[in-house]
Amino acid sequence: MRLIRTLARFGVATAAGVLSGRASFGQCLGVWTDVSSPGPSPRQDHAMVYDTLRDRIVLFGGFTAPGAIGDTWAWDQTGWTDLNATGPSPRSDHAMAYDSARDRVVLFGGYDGALDGETWEFDGSAWTLAATGGPSARRGHAMAYDSARQRVVMFGGVGSDGGTWEWDGASWVRMPDNGSPPTHRWGHGLAFDSLRNRTVLASGRDLGGFKTDTKSWNGSAWTSHAFTTAPTSETAGLAYDSFRDRVVSFGGWTGTSSSNNTREWNGVSTSWTTTTATTGRPPARQQLAIVYDPLHRRIVLFGGQSSTNQILGDTWIYQGPSAPLIIQQPMDVAVSSGQMAAFSVQVGTVPAPSYQWRRSGANLVDDGRIVGATTASLTIHDAQPADAGSYDVVLSNACGTQTSSAAVLTVQPAAAQGDLNCDGSVNVLDINPFVLALSDPAAYAGLYPGCMIENGDINGDGSVDVLDINPFVALLLP
């Protein structure tokens, strides 16, 4: 009999600018990257969560030949670390969620030779048995953390009554079956949609076969969502990408084979969309675990069972597709005539965008003095007053187009030799700026960003130093 499998996970960023329609080139697809490194042994039916306080992913347990595992691991973007934490008995098919309000990983149930009904909590260094009462022992269930109501939500599993339970850090409460509750099932996924404050349930299996429905729980009632296309699998991975507002599903068992499809739902449409190319993605698998890392805006996958029943131990990250999302806008720049001016933009987006810098709405082209007109960084050498104006950049990829906010370039006339404060005169008001230019050039540049420190090179030897003091004093004398 095929093992029952489960996973758990939970899930902001803003981008300024104008978002417009789809571009006419390429395909709007996400990217999977294999980042496997030494770490947990190959396994299936394990569970993972993202620890927001420590910026790391926590993994516990799972199954590998010849049996269940009881180890605790953390992944911190550079690699895996065995936390050597004593806690729950070795088990598989359990579920976990991270309670960010209390800084606790919450684990319930699983299979350790028998169905388990324990509740454990992990504080980052040690496991504690939190409760033994409440829901019936089960496996193949799913959990997610509702950050709006500060509750862990659990549904389903083999051995359960098919109901909805919530954990508040002290006790479990059986919630009423209001609305359109899911059928009793196992091998489904739960993920919390933090934009709409609801827990999304997808797929799974019941006694009647594989489920294609998607439902959501708002804390008081279940809602059914109608779809024309939806995932049909059990033990797929499910996570909510809060940066892009997408529920993401990967893999699972379809009844005849394992899958390596990546599908996404935007929370409002009537279809799940396939979002990766047929190449470059993880091998097909089931009984895996995925979790969303909101700080680095990506989904992390570990392990599972392949189509050939091989137990896997690889680590992958997924960056979902989106129109360009600007995470650092161009900044205003002020320079003196003849100085270099530079603008840059930072984008966190897959697919990678094209760039087109503009001045006052007109496209720029490289001409030797202007460099980088179609890159993330624009440089204007020997800036002149005619270069002053409003600069922005248009970013485009297969998913859409975005225009950055405008940055203003101010070009001041070149100051006279000795005019260190750039007020157009050489007088006693230039003494302190001159002394600062001599003693701390970096501080001078910060305090007088539009002035050229070279104006302090009074003797013309190419340096601003003590040899310029007497010539500078001479400029001040009548």
Image (cartoon, grey):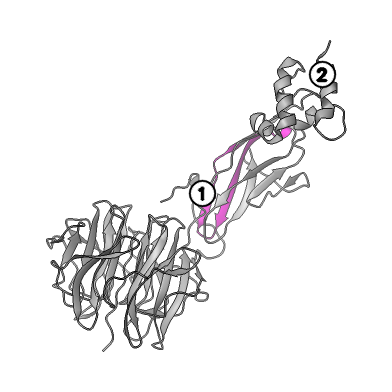
Identity, as a three-letter code, of the amino acid under mark 2: Val
Position of 409 compared to 202: left or right? right
Identity, as a three-letter code, of the amino acid under mark 1: Ile
> Which callout, 2 or 1, points at the residue further toward the start of the chain?
1
- In percent of width and height, residue 334 lies at 66, 33
Which of the image's four quarters has the N terminus?
Answer: bottom left
Position of 261 compared to 267: left or right? right
Q: Magenta span covers which residues?
A: 385-407
What residue do we see at 34% from left, 62% from top? 125
In the image, residue 428 above or below residue 170: above
- In percent of width and height, residue 184 lies at 17, 73
What residue do we see at 72% from left, 31% from top? 439
In the image, residue 182 above or below residue 93: above
Q: Which residue is mark 2?
A: 473
**SS state under label 1:** strand
Is residue 100 in view from this perspective?
yes
The image quadrant of residue 185 is: bottom left
The image quadrant of residue 217 is: bottom left
- In percent of width and height, residue 167 lies at 20, 60
Is residue 423 in view from this perspective?
no
Which of the image's four quarters has the C terminus?
Answer: top right
How much space separates mark 2 and mark 1, taking CA atoms? Answer: 48 Å
Q: Which mark is residue 327?
A: 1
What residue do we see at 71% from left, 24% from top? 433
**Which one is nearer the viewer's eye here, 213 or 243?**
243
Magenta includes 393?
yes
The crowding category of the residue bearing disc 1, from other C-alpha atoms within 10 Å (few below 14, some 14 to 19, many at least 20), is some
